[in-house]
Image: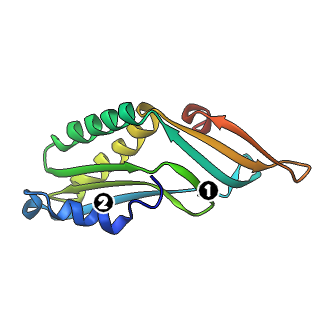
């Protein structure tokens, strides 16, 4: 949930991995709420999930990517709740032996969580008449 986790927490958890001594690189992706979508000002986002299924899928993605050569740890933490523009809503962290190993895995982890995990996003935007309207967005629609 929002407020339960910060990037420093994710880094500390990675450093506690029993294989962290093999690490030479840590790459991170931090997703934040964008203030503009389709030329409309975003007021806030609301994120919900079927948590049990979402956690299972996130775990599967992390486990699979952690098996890659030179990868020590993969973590994906997607927060839920209401978020204002600029607030952090996802942390993806990849720890590996070399930077050449972590960047491709980081990109794949981000792409996979966006397409595979049942997280639902409701956007609140300011319309042409300066009123706030909201709608549920699928990731596939936002990736056009």
- Rendered residue at 7%/57% (across/down): 18
Q: Quadrant of residue 30?
A: bottom left
Mark 2 neighbour density, 10 Å: few (under 14) some (14–19) many (20 or more): some
Residue 131: x and y in percent read 86, 50
Foreground of the two, 69 or 16: 16
Quick one: label 2 or label 1, which is nearer the N terminus? 2
In the shown orientation, is residue 100 left or right of residue 55? Answer: left
Figure disc tally:
2
Report which residue position mark 1 lands on: 34
In the shown orientation, is residue 49 left or right of residue 66? Answer: right
Residue 54: x and y in percent read 39, 35
- Rendered residue at 62%/60% (across/down): 84
Secondary structure of the residue carrying tag 2 is strand
Foreground of the two, 69 or 118: 118
Query: Is there CB contact under 8 Å for labels 2 and 1?
Result: no
Q: From the image, which quarter does the C terminus lie in?
A: top right
* Colour style of the rendered protein structure: rainbow
In the shown orientation, is residue 135 left or right of residue 57? Answer: right
Mark 1 neighbour density, 10 Å: few (under 14) some (14–19) many (20 or more): some
Report which residue position mark 2 lands on: 27
Q: Nearer the viewer, mark 2 or mark 1?
A: 1
* 71 in relation to 22, above or below: above
Q: Residue furthest right?
A: 129
Secondary structure of the residue carrying tag 1 is loop
Q: Rounded to the nearest whole Å, what is the CA distance between mark 2 and mark 1?
A: 21 Å
- Rendered residue at 71%/54% (across/down): 42
Residue 143: x and y in percent read 57, 38
- Rendered residue at 37%/30% (across/down): 53
In the shown orientation, is residue 23 left or right of residue 38? Answer: left
């Amino acid at each position: 949930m929002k407020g339960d986790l910060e990037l420093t927490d994710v880094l500390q958890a990675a450093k506690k991995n029993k294989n962290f001594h093999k690490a030479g690189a840590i790459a991170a992706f931090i997703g934040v709420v964008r203030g503009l979508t389709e030329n409309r000002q975003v007021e806030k986002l609301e994120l919900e999930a079927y948590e049990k299924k979402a956690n299972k899928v996130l775990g599967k993605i992390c486990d699979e990517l952690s098996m890659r050569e030179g990868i020590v740890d993969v973590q994906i933490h997607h927060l839920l709740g209401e978020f204002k523009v600029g607030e952090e809503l996802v942390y993806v962290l990849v720890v590996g032996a070399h930077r050449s190993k972590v960047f491709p895995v980081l990109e794949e982890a981000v792409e996979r969580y966006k397409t595979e995990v049942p997280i639902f996003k409701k956007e609140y935007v300011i319309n042409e008449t300066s009123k706030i309207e909201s709608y549920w967005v699928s990731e596939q629609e936002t990736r056009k």
